Protein backbone atom coordinates (compact mmCIF):
# COMPACT_ATOMS: atom_id res chain seq x y z
CA UNK A 1 0.00 0.00 0.00
CA UNK A 2 1.65 3.23 -1.20
CA UNK A 3 0.76 6.49 0.54
CA UNK A 4 1.87 10.06 -0.06
CA UNK A 5 1.21 12.30 2.94
CA UNK A 6 1.91 15.98 2.29
CA UNK A 7 2.46 18.66 4.90
CA UNK A 8 0.52 21.90 5.35
CA UNK A 9 -0.65 23.40 2.04
CA UNK A 10 0.00 27.14 2.29
CA UNK A 11 -1.74 29.76 0.16
CA UNK A 12 -2.31 30.12 -3.59
CA UNK A 13 1.19 29.07 -4.70
CA UNK A 14 1.02 25.93 -2.54
CA UNK A 15 -2.40 25.13 -3.96
CA UNK A 16 -1.14 25.70 -7.49
CA UNK A 17 1.93 23.48 -7.06
CA UNK A 18 -0.15 20.70 -5.56
CA UNK A 19 -3.06 20.75 -7.98
CA UNK A 20 -0.78 20.78 -11.03
CA UNK A 21 1.63 18.07 -9.79
CA UNK A 22 -0.58 15.57 -8.01
CA UNK A 23 -2.14 13.77 -11.00
CA UNK A 24 1.33 12.82 -12.34
CA UNK A 25 2.68 12.04 -8.84
CA UNK A 26 -0.16 9.57 -8.32
CA UNK A 27 0.96 7.70 -11.44
CA UNK A 28 4.70 8.06 -10.90
CA UNK A 29 4.62 6.52 -7.40
CA UNK A 30 1.63 4.15 -7.96
CA UNK A 31 -0.11 5.82 -5.05
CA UNK A 32 -3.06 4.12 -3.39
CA UNK A 33 -3.77 7.05 -1.09
CA UNK A 34 -2.90 10.74 -0.92
CA UNK A 35 -3.53 12.81 2.19
CA UNK A 36 -2.64 16.44 2.90
CA UNK A 37 -2.89 18.79 5.82
CA UNK A 38 -5.05 21.62 4.47
CA UNK A 39 -5.55 24.00 7.37
CA UNK A 40 -3.51 26.83 5.77
CA UNK A 41 -4.63 26.34 2.18
CA UNK A 42 -6.84 29.42 1.86
CA UNK A 43 -4.49 32.41 1.81
CA UNK A 44 -2.45 30.86 4.61
CA UNK A 45 -5.24 30.78 7.18
CA UNK A 46 -7.97 28.14 7.26
CA UNK A 47 -9.69 26.34 4.42
CA UNK A 48 -12.64 27.60 2.40
CA UNK A 49 -15.05 24.99 0.93
CA UNK A 50 -14.05 25.91 -2.66
CA UNK A 51 -10.38 25.19 -1.89
CA UNK A 52 -11.38 21.97 -0.14
CA UNK A 53 -13.18 20.87 -3.32
CA UNK A 54 -10.16 21.84 -5.45
CA UNK A 55 -7.96 19.58 -3.31
CA UNK A 56 -10.33 16.63 -3.65
CA UNK A 57 -10.71 17.29 -7.38
CA UNK A 58 -6.95 17.11 -8.06
CA UNK A 59 -6.61 13.68 -6.43
CA UNK A 60 -6.38 14.23 -2.67
CA UNK A 61 -8.22 11.44 -0.80
CA UNK A 62 -8.24 13.03 2.65
CA UNK A 63 -7.63 16.46 4.20
CA UNK A 64 -6.44 16.68 7.80
CA UNK A 65 -6.00 19.89 9.76
CA UNK A 66 -5.15 21.49 13.09
CA UNK A 67 -5.48 24.70 15.07
CA UNK A 68 -6.38 26.91 12.06
CA UNK A 69 -9.27 24.75 10.87
CA UNK A 70 -11.88 26.96 12.56
CA UNK A 71 -10.67 30.14 10.83
CA UNK A 72 -13.26 30.05 8.01
CA UNK A 73 -16.73 29.82 9.44
CA UNK A 74 -18.20 28.69 6.12
CA UNK A 75 -16.24 25.41 6.36
CA UNK A 76 -17.93 24.30 9.56
CA UNK A 77 -21.07 23.01 7.83
CA UNK A 78 -18.86 20.91 5.49
CA UNK A 79 -18.01 18.74 8.48
CA UNK A 80 -21.58 17.50 8.72
CA UNK A 81 -21.31 15.80 5.34
CA UNK A 82 -19.72 12.41 4.98
CA UNK A 83 -16.52 13.74 3.47
CA UNK A 84 -12.89 12.91 4.32
CA UNK A 85 -12.14 16.18 6.08
CA UNK A 86 -10.69 15.94 9.58
CA UNK A 87 -10.26 18.19 12.56
CA UNK A 88 -8.09 16.97 15.44
CA UNK A 89 -9.80 14.14 17.33
CA UNK A 90 -8.88 15.60 20.72
CA UNK A 91 -11.07 18.70 20.46
CA UNK A 92 -13.83 18.76 23.08
CA UNK A 93 -16.89 16.73 22.11
CA UNK A 94 -19.02 19.81 21.29
CA UNK A 95 -16.76 20.81 18.38
CA UNK A 96 -18.11 20.04 14.88
CA UNK A 97 -16.52 17.39 12.72
CA UNK A 98 -14.63 14.18 13.14
CA UNK A 99 -11.04 13.26 13.98
CA UNK A 100 -10.60 10.04 12.04
CA UNK A 101 -11.71 8.51 8.75
CA UNK A 102 -11.48 5.15 7.01
CA UNK A 103 -10.38 5.16 3.36
CA UNK A 104 -10.58 2.09 1.16
CA UNK A 105 -8.77 0.90 -1.97
CA UNK A 106 -8.11 -2.37 -3.81
CA UNK A 107 -5.14 -2.91 -1.44
CA UNK A 108 -7.30 -2.59 1.69
CA UNK A 109 -8.44 -0.01 4.21
CA UNK A 110 -6.39 2.82 5.65
CA UNK A 111 -7.52 4.78 8.69
CA UNK A 112 -6.23 8.30 9.25
CA UNK A 113 -6.31 9.89 12.68
CA UNK A 114 -5.75 13.61 13.26
CA UNK A 115 -4.50 14.85 16.65
CA UNK A 116 -3.32 18.20 17.96
CA UNK A 117 -0.51 18.83 20.42
CA UNK A 118 -0.93 20.80 23.64
CA UNK A 119 2.60 22.09 24.20
CA UNK A 120 3.17 25.67 22.98
CA UNK A 121 -0.07 25.62 20.98
CA UNK A 122 -2.06 27.95 23.24
CA UNK A 123 -5.20 25.81 23.17
CA UNK A 124 -6.84 23.63 25.81
CA UNK A 125 -7.60 20.51 23.81
CA UNK A 126 -8.00 17.06 25.39
CA UNK A 127 -4.96 14.83 25.98
CA UNK A 128 -3.69 13.66 22.57
CA UNK A 129 -2.06 10.57 24.13
CA UNK A 130 -5.21 9.28 25.82
CA UNK A 131 -7.34 10.16 22.80
CA UNK A 132 -4.92 8.29 20.52
CA UNK A 133 -4.91 5.14 22.64
CA UNK A 134 -8.68 5.00 22.94
CA UNK A 135 -9.38 5.76 19.28
CA UNK A 136 -6.74 3.40 17.91
CA UNK A 137 -8.04 0.56 20.08
CA UNK A 138 -11.41 0.98 18.37
CA UNK A 139 -10.01 1.43 14.84
CA UNK A 140 -7.81 -1.68 15.02
CA UNK A 141 -10.98 -3.81 14.92
CA UNK A 142 -11.48 -2.53 11.38
CA UNK A 143 -7.94 -2.17 10.01
CA UNK A 144 -4.30 -2.52 11.08
CA UNK A 145 -3.26 0.19 8.62
CA UNK A 146 -3.45 3.45 10.54
CA UNK A 147 -1.67 6.77 10.00
CA UNK A 148 -1.66 9.57 12.56
CA UNK A 149 -1.20 13.24 11.64
CA UNK A 150 0.06 14.86 14.85
CA UNK A 151 -0.35 18.60 14.38
CA UNK A 152 1.99 19.96 17.01
CA UNK A 153 4.73 22.48 17.70
CA UNK A 154 6.84 20.73 20.29
CA UNK A 155 9.42 18.13 19.22
CA UNK A 156 9.47 16.44 22.63
CA UNK A 157 5.71 15.99 22.56
CA UNK A 158 5.90 14.57 19.03
CA UNK A 159 8.63 12.07 19.91
CA UNK A 160 6.71 11.03 23.03
CA UNK A 161 3.74 10.11 20.83
CA UNK A 162 6.09 8.11 18.57
CA UNK A 163 7.14 6.11 21.66
CA UNK A 164 3.55 5.51 22.74
CA UNK A 165 2.28 4.38 19.34
CA UNK A 166 5.25 2.33 18.06
CA UNK A 167 3.84 -1.06 17.10
CA UNK A 168 0.22 0.12 17.25
CA UNK A 169 0.00 2.16 14.04
CA UNK A 170 1.64 2.25 10.60
CA UNK A 171 2.92 5.78 11.00
CA UNK A 172 2.96 8.97 13.03
CA UNK A 173 3.65 12.08 10.97
CA UNK A 174 4.14 15.54 12.41
CA UNK A 175 2.70 18.66 10.83
CA UNK A 176 2.32 22.36 11.78
CA UNK A 177 5.85 23.82 11.89
CA UNK A 178 6.09 24.09 8.06
CA UNK A 179 9.78 23.11 8.23
CA UNK A 180 10.62 19.61 7.02
CA UNK A 181 12.76 17.42 9.26
CA UNK A 182 15.23 14.72 8.12
CA UNK A 183 14.46 12.10 10.77
CA UNK A 184 12.10 9.84 8.76
CA UNK A 185 12.60 6.25 9.93
CA UNK A 186 10.77 3.05 10.79
CA UNK A 187 10.87 2.24 14.53
CA UNK A 188 11.45 -1.28 15.90
CA UNK A 189 7.72 -1.97 16.27
CA UNK A 190 7.08 -1.24 12.57
CA UNK A 191 5.83 2.34 12.91
CA UNK A 192 7.13 4.97 10.47
CA UNK A 193 7.76 8.38 12.00
CA UNK A 194 8.81 11.85 10.91
CA UNK A 195 8.80 14.88 13.21
CA UNK A 196 7.50 17.29 10.58
CA UNK A 197 6.49 16.78 6.97
CA UNK A 198 7.18 20.42 6.08
CA UNK A 199 4.85 22.50 3.93
CA UNK A 200 3.51 22.69 0.41
CA UNK A 201 4.12 26.38 0.19
CA UNK A 202 6.36 29.23 -0.97
CA UNK A 203 10.10 28.62 -0.58
CA UNK A 204 11.11 32.26 -0.35
CA UNK A 205 9.04 33.03 2.73
CA UNK A 206 8.99 32.83 6.52
CA UNK A 207 7.00 29.62 7.10
CA UNK A 208 4.84 30.66 4.14
CA UNK A 209 4.42 34.36 4.93
CA UNK A 210 6.05 37.45 3.40
CA UNK A 211 9.58 37.69 4.89
CA UNK A 212 9.60 41.52 5.13
CA UNK A 213 6.47 41.58 7.30
CA UNK A 214 7.63 38.77 9.53
CA UNK A 215 11.02 40.40 10.00
CA UNK A 216 9.40 43.76 10.81
CA UNK A 217 7.21 42.06 13.40
CA UNK A 218 10.26 40.50 15.03
CA UNK A 219 12.22 43.75 14.96
CA UNK A 220 9.43 46.00 16.29
CA UNK A 221 7.33 43.52 18.33
CA UNK A 222 4.24 45.15 16.78
CA UNK A 223 1.29 42.75 16.34
CA UNK A 224 1.48 43.00 12.53
CA UNK A 225 -0.89 40.82 10.54
CA UNK A 226 1.09 38.26 8.53
CA UNK A 227 0.38 37.93 4.80
CA UNK A 228 0.96 34.82 2.75
CA UNK A 229 3.82 34.92 0.22
CA UNK A 230 2.95 34.20 -3.40
CA UNK A 231 6.44 33.03 -4.37
CA UNK A 232 6.85 29.65 -6.13
CA UNK A 233 6.11 26.69 -3.88
CA UNK A 234 7.80 23.40 -3.02
CA UNK A 235 5.89 20.27 -2.11
CA UNK A 236 6.97 18.52 1.11
CA UNK A 237 5.82 15.34 2.78
CA UNK A 238 6.60 11.65 3.00
CA UNK A 239 6.12 8.53 0.90
CA UNK A 240 5.19 5.43 2.87
CA UNK A 241 4.90 1.79 1.96
CA UNK A 242 2.65 -0.17 4.30
CA UNK A 243 2.13 -3.93 4.50
CA UNK A 244 -1.65 -4.22 4.20
CA UNK A 245 -1.73 -7.53 6.13
CA UNK A 246 0.20 -6.47 9.22
CA UNK A 247 -0.16 -2.68 9.07
CA UNK A 248 3.62 -2.37 9.55
CA UNK A 249 5.46 0.31 7.62
CA UNK A 250 7.93 -1.22 5.16
CA UNK A 251 9.54 2.13 4.39
CA UNK A 252 9.24 5.88 4.76
CA UNK A 253 11.00 8.31 2.43
CA UNK A 254 11.16 12.07 2.84
CA UNK A 255 9.49 13.74 -0.14
CA UNK A 256 10.49 17.21 -1.37
CA UNK A 257 9.76 18.55 -4.86
CA UNK A 258 11.10 21.96 -5.76
CA UNK A 259 9.41 24.26 -8.34
CA UNK A 260 10.34 23.19 -11.89
CA UNK A 261 11.13 19.62 -10.83
CA UNK A 262 7.59 18.51 -11.68
CA UNK A 263 8.59 18.50 -15.37
CA UNK A 264 11.77 16.44 -14.92
FE1 LIG B 1 -1.12 24.68 12.46
Image: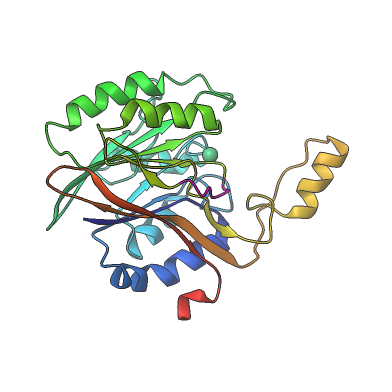
**In the image, 256: left or right of 127?**
right
Q: Which residues are magenta?
A: 178-183
Classify the position of the N terminus by image quarter.
bottom left
Percent coordinates x, y for residue 64 in the rendering: 39, 43
Q: Position of residue 126 (x, y in %)?
A: 42, 18
Q: Is residue 94 visible?
A: no
Residue sitting nearer the eye, 53 or 165: 165
Left or right: residue 1 compared with residue 228: left
Q: Nearer the viewer, residue 130 or 229?
A: 130
253 horizontally vs 157: left or right? left
Q: Position of residue 201 (x, y in %)?
A: 56, 58
Left of 17 or right of it: where is 203?
Answer: right
241 relative to 159, above or below? below
Residue 20 vertical placement versus 169 (above, below): below
Residue at image x 45%, y 64%? 18
Residue at left 12%, top 46%? Answer: 245
**Can residue 173 be seen in the rendering of this structure?**
yes
- Tell me which corner region of the image, top left, top right, bottom left or bottom right, holds residue 222: top right
Magenta: main secondary structure equals loop
- Residue at far bottom of view: 264
Q: Is residue 4 above or below residue 175?
A: below
Q: Report which quarter residue 224 is drawn in.
A: top right
**Residue placed furthest toward the right:** 220
Quick check: is 182 in the magenta stretch?
Answer: yes
Residue 244 placement (x, y as % from top left): 15, 49
Amino acid sequence: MNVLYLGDVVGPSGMRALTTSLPSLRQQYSLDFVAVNGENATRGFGLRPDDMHRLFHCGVDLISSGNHIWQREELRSSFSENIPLLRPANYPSGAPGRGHYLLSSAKGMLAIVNLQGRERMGMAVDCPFQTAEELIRQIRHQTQCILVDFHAEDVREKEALFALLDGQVSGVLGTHTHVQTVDARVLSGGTAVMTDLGMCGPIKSVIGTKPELSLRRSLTQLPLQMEVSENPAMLCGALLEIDPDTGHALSITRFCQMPGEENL
